Amino acid sequence: MEIEMLVKKQRAYFEKGKTKNVAWRLAALKTLKKSILKHEKEINQALYEDLGKSEMETYMCETGMVLSELSYMISHLRSYARDKAVLTPVSQFHARSFTSPEPYGVVLVMAPWNYPFMLAMEPLIGAIAAGNCVIVKPSAYAPATADIIEKIIQDCFQPHFTAVVKGGRKENTALLEQRFDFIFFTGSVAVGRFVMEKASRNLTPVCLELGGKSPCIVDRTANIRLAAKRIVFGKYLNLGQTCVAPDYLFVHEDVKEALLREIERCIRRQFGAHPLDNPDYGKIINEKHFNRVLGLMKGVNVRIGGGSRKETLQIEPTVLTEVTPSSPVMQEEIFGPLLPVMTFREISEVITYVTRHEKPLALYLFTGSRAVQRQILKYCSFGGGCINDTIIHLATSRMGFGGVGASGMGSYHGRDSFELFSHRRSIVKKYTWMDLPVRYQPYTSLKKAMLRIFLK
């Protein structure tokens, strides 16, 4: 009942039209930015409690990303919110055609636990910029971060405009029973299906940011040393609990051993000889996921790492070999610090494997060959990715980020966020000083001839 009343209050506030004022939206975004800066130390502490994130990693992957998105949106919002003129067809002479963005209304943002601050705040920024009222649902698996998100939003806004609902499955279900005008969800494919099913009852549009098994491909022409360094960074960041982390490695058999030696060297260099003792090395979110990840190592060879510490929920950066497509580790998204390795002879083998499985959220290709690059981009469908790097494609407000197929739908960041949370109306303003008679009955042969001239 409390959630139902909150949605009703937000809908009533939205109907007053205050959020449609662009200057008001800009003021809201600036207020949010000031509050985040004010509470930065508390954000750091919360993410350390929930995920063991270091201050450097928190700023690089969470707080800094949010502040960058805020700055970008504040700088560009006025231009995004303007009407856009469109060329009017001769058949509609004399008129002016344009598109005009309007907010959806009351929006629900459901955030995950792996980047619990960034993945709550970045959609919120887009929703506010577009002029919506918003309810944010942080993950119950990251309670300290949920608390600081609530504190920041209460510091900035009245609940009839933007509010936080904390809790677990019960609260999620109660929220999805309400009628929202748009739902933004980041999380697993299974829960994404449930969200979409609930949304379909009210024909509510959704953005689903899911995941999947994102391949990392290294061909024989790649810069092996650089590839290893960037793969280790992308894979083991946040202990692999990243939706766009390289999920498995496909390496040309001629360079497999050289790459694995470099990966082992890079792990030691980045995390030390004993990663579990590294104060900047995080932890798995909870015991359930810790046990699940450990279970994925069954039936394969542990080539590098494999150690774990249950009391701190940590698993070493691990590389697995003797992996086949039927291995348990290849049956689900890993979401942990395990990197299974498979080999190939011809790039066509990789293309066949990738295209016969669900479309991944990300794809990474390390190559010095333009021909290989063209083949992968031509035949493999994926949400986004990098050539000769990992993960960094999402770290910009100038390109949208999103999935395709089973890895999600919809795209956000920068302009894409504004458009995602807006409905763009198509409008023709017809002038009244003249009225062409062609469309009106009676239909004469002259009118038919004129119509063909206008519409051919």
Image: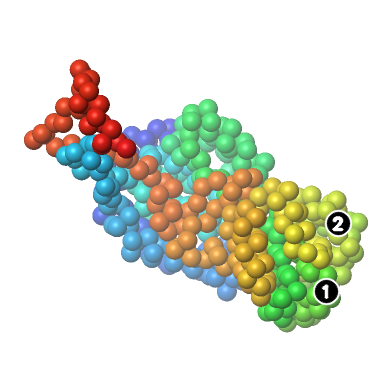
Q: Residues within 10 Å of mark 2 (few under 14, many from 20)?
A: some
- Answer above or below: position of 68 versus 158: below
Instruction: Identify the residue at the far top of this view.
Output: 442
Residue 429 visible, this angle: no
Q: Residues within 10 Å of mark 1 (few under 14, many from 20)?
A: few
Give the numbered dot on residue 254: 1
Give the numbered dot on residue 181: none
Instruction: Estimate the x, y position of residue 113 in percent, counting from the top left.
Output: 62, 54
Q: Amino acid at mark 2?
A: Thr
Q: Is residue 119 left or right of residue 299?
A: left
Instruction: Estimate the x, y position of residue 333 in percent, counting from the top left.
Output: 73, 53
Q: Is residue 12 left or right of residue 443?
A: right
Eye-nearest disc, 1 or 2: 1
- Answer above or below: position of 140 versus 204: below
Q: Residue at x 37, y 42 (%)?
A: 423
C-alpha span from label 1 to label 2? 18 Å
Q: Residue at x 61, y 60 (%)?
A: 377
Q: Residue at x 79, y 56 (%)?
A: 293
Give the numbered dot on residue 324: 2
Q: Give residue 93's quadrant in the image.
A: top left
